[in-house]
Amino acid sequence: MEFRVTATDGAARRGRLTLPHGVVDTPAFMPVGTYGTVKAMSPRELVEIGAQIVLGNTFHLWLRPGLEVIAAHGGLHRFMGWDGPILTDSGGYQVYSLGPLRKITEEGVRFQSPVNGAPCFLTPEESMRIQRVLAADIVMVFDECTPYPAEVAQARDSMRLSLRWAERSKRAHEGNPNALFGIVQGGMHEELRDESLAGLEAIGFDGYAIGGLSVGETKREMMRVLRHSAPRLPADRPRYLMGVGTPQDIVAAVAAGIDLFDCVLPTRNARNGWVYTRRGVVKLRNARHRDEVEPLDEECGCYTCRNFTRAYLHHLQRVNEILGARLNTLHNLYYYLELMRGLREAIERGRLADFAAELKSQMKPPMNTGERRRDRDPDRPD
């Protein structure tokens, strides 16, 4: 892996991340392909709309279809027919989401499979073994996501356990040529976030992620922790904000110095008929769209906006046609990827503040989309 910052605008960075399966221009958004597919999208369509890298999930792919199937294909790339870079999450958050079905110990996490109830045991070493079989370009350490809310003592214990697991993940990763990222934890407590980062830097990783945000905290809390932690991450390594978020969140995080993002909002909301436009979110099920003959966004160049009206998309949503989910997903991902392209260009030109102000002025007041970090429910990944 090679990462190079090519331009800056304040704390924001424009960069190039070179990985075994391709180059990623940053800041970049990773569509979420939990089960080895970005829901409703083919790999060819992802390429056509400008996706550079996708995310897969260790936990879900381990349970279904299982490592033997993926190993027989030579890894996740060939299994899912995607030639570009892949990042795999470690499964730590998904295990956390199991709630009473899991028991966390120093060694790892014991839980019952949400698929068939079978007993499972996931450790840092096992997570690294699974990810070695998946053969993603970037793999994540196995961590414990600090619950929200968490008092200082609970958050400290959780964060320090994640540090010990990070060290074990690093040892188990030895010999793997692909990049390994550490994850900063510590809840809403800035001093614990600092301790977590110092511990991760002492171990040494190829990149650093901010985890444990968008887990129920207020927007103000999330931004406080983000703006505290982002500029402290190593400047010569890629910075990844996990599971966040809305377009406004992404713009704010880019301004704080984040390079990589993933979130299920564009795909999940698309299937529910919520689509993103320059003017804000459009809820296609609303009756007001029944007779609208204009596209979702007249300035959008996606296939959906070039060929279909709001009335048609409203109709598909009301009758639950599969095509509706596909067209909405294509549009939402195109919107997110175009947003990232605009951010990259704005940083290159030193106009990020103007870009952010223009985006904000165009949008209606932000709606509550109920977003959370990906995989609230382990059986509903996105």
Image: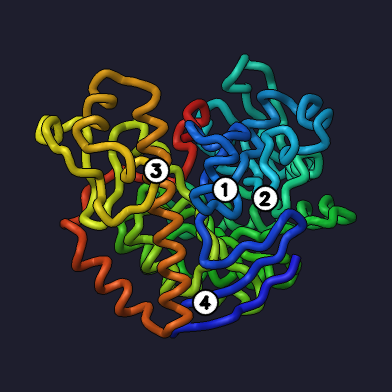
Q: Earlier in the sequence, mark 1 or mark 3?
A: 1
Q: Specify whether 271 is left or right of 56.
A: left
Where residue 251 appears, as percent x and y from the top left, is 38, 66
Kindly identify which residue carries mark 4.
Answer: 13
Report the amino acid beneath label 1: Val
Q: Which residue is mark 3?
A: 303
Q: How many marks?
A: 4
Residue 165 at least partly seen: no
Residue 84 bears which disc, if any?
Answer: 2
Q: Mark 1 near mark 2, Cβ–Cβ under 8 Å?
A: yes
Dot in front, 1 or 2: 1
**Under tag 1, what secondary structure?**
helix
Quarter of the N terminus within the rendering? bottom right
How far, Cα to Cα, is label 4 from label 1? Answer: 24 Å
Amino acid type at circle 2 is Gly
Which amino acid does the dot numbered 4 rest on?
Answer: Arg
**Residue at 80% across, 31% down:** 73
Residue corresponding to mark 1: 47
